[in-house]
Amino acid sequence: MKQILLLVAIVAGLSLRSYSQNIVLSDQAEISVMTCGVSDLIHAIYGHTAVRVNDPVKHFDVVFNFGVFSFREPNFVYRFAKGNANYMLAPERYSDFYEDYGRNGRSIQEQVLNLSPEEKQQMLNFLINNAKPENREYRYDFFFDNCATRVRDLVEKQVEGQLVFPTKNEGMTFRQHVTKYQQILPWTNFGIQLVLGSPADQVASANEEMFLPQYLFKHFAGAKVETNGESHPLVLKTNMIYEAKEKTVSKLVIYSPELILFVLFLLVGLITFKQLKSRKVNYAIDYVLLFVNGLIGVVLLWFFLYSEHPEMKANYNQFWAIGLNLPFLFLWMIKPVRGVLRWYWVALSVWLLLFFPLSLVLPQHFDTGFYLLTAMLLCRSLVHSRFLLTRN
């Protein structure tokens, strides 16, 4: 969840490899989990997790990041949407890490792990080996394989004994978890809600909700390591490295999708009412609504057919966002064929009317804005259906 230019990551990785191939940590070395605060940048709204290895005796202070990517890679946005974008593990100097987050006003908390010298050395060796060019890349998955889950898995595998998390889960779905963070960017949240399918409405277990850095921090704080019937806390101590001003989100945002769509809904309703009274129809507003609705449907169909993201499958938003509206729109512009297509409005009205009661039983949450978009198109399809059915 942190962007670092690919070139910088490569240089840092090569430098670390040449410097630390044979490094042996001293007794004063510490390994920490670094949890960083959120930002209003889209790639940083969920926070970030990294691992710090600090040995003052060896003058070795390096942060290992599992969330490194570059927008400059060919077709990165397309590959990210498709679900085959690669992220990587890359090291950087702690001083650079601190300066970067401090400059961007993001808090940094450090959980020093309660590890034996052997565990520290083993963990460092693992990190160095996995930061090599041939090992550093991994296939990113937002919910199940990201910078936070990689750190969780690293600690679970490298400590001697069983890592136990006594903290219960929040009982929230994956969608509810990410929505909390996405409120800072209302339109980004609206778009993400569109592409997230019903898998995102499953309740995240305590282990699964650690895909978010703050929940990893929370669960690590209460975790214990059990070995031969004895246990000790995973975290030795917690340090607040840098405390930024807390970002607050206003509940009433004048540019929020819900407010804007509600105003548009009232406008569409008013125009439709006037056309109904005058029995004169202007299709301009229909073209816009059909285009928006159909385009959303086509995009969602693409995600369903081609995306490898499991959370974007079984997306019931396709019940109201109908890709068939797009070709119908262009055909309806051809006046001679309207007589053949006019019954499409009736079928569309029935389908959209069915969506509202069906949405109450479907295993997916629907954003308020989606109902407003559906209601706008329903208004238009109903008025066309009325003119058709009452035509003399």
Image: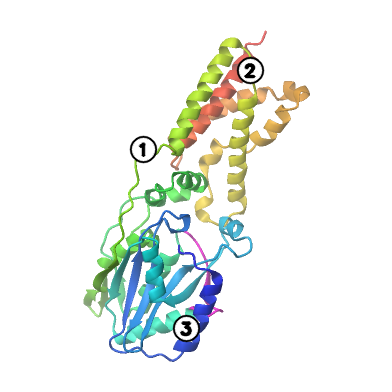
| Depth order, front residue of 263/299 | 263
Give the mark nearest the N terminus, 2 or 3: 3
Residue carrying label 3 = 16
Give the mark nearest the N terminus, 1 or 2: 1
Q: Which mark is residue 252?
A: 1
**Which residue is found at the position 47% from the left and 34% from the top?**
260
- Is disc 1 in contact with disc 2, using a CB cutoff of under 8 Å? no
Residue carrying label 2 = 281
**Which residue is found at the position 30% from the left and 53% from the top?**
170
How far apart, in angstroms, are the residues tagged by discs 1 and 2? 36 Å
**Which residue is found at the position 55% from the left and 70% from the top?**
6
User: In this rendering, does residue 50 appear at all?
Assistant: no
Secondary structure beneath dot 3 equals: helix
Give the mark nearest the N terminus, 3 or 1: 3
How far apart, in angstroms, are the residues tagged by discs 2 and 3? 70 Å
How far apart, in angstroms, are the residues tagged by discs 3 and 1? 48 Å
**Depth-wise, is mark 2 or mark 3 nearer the camera?**
3
Residue 319 against residue 238 in the figure, above or below: above
Q: Which residues are magenta?
A: 131-142
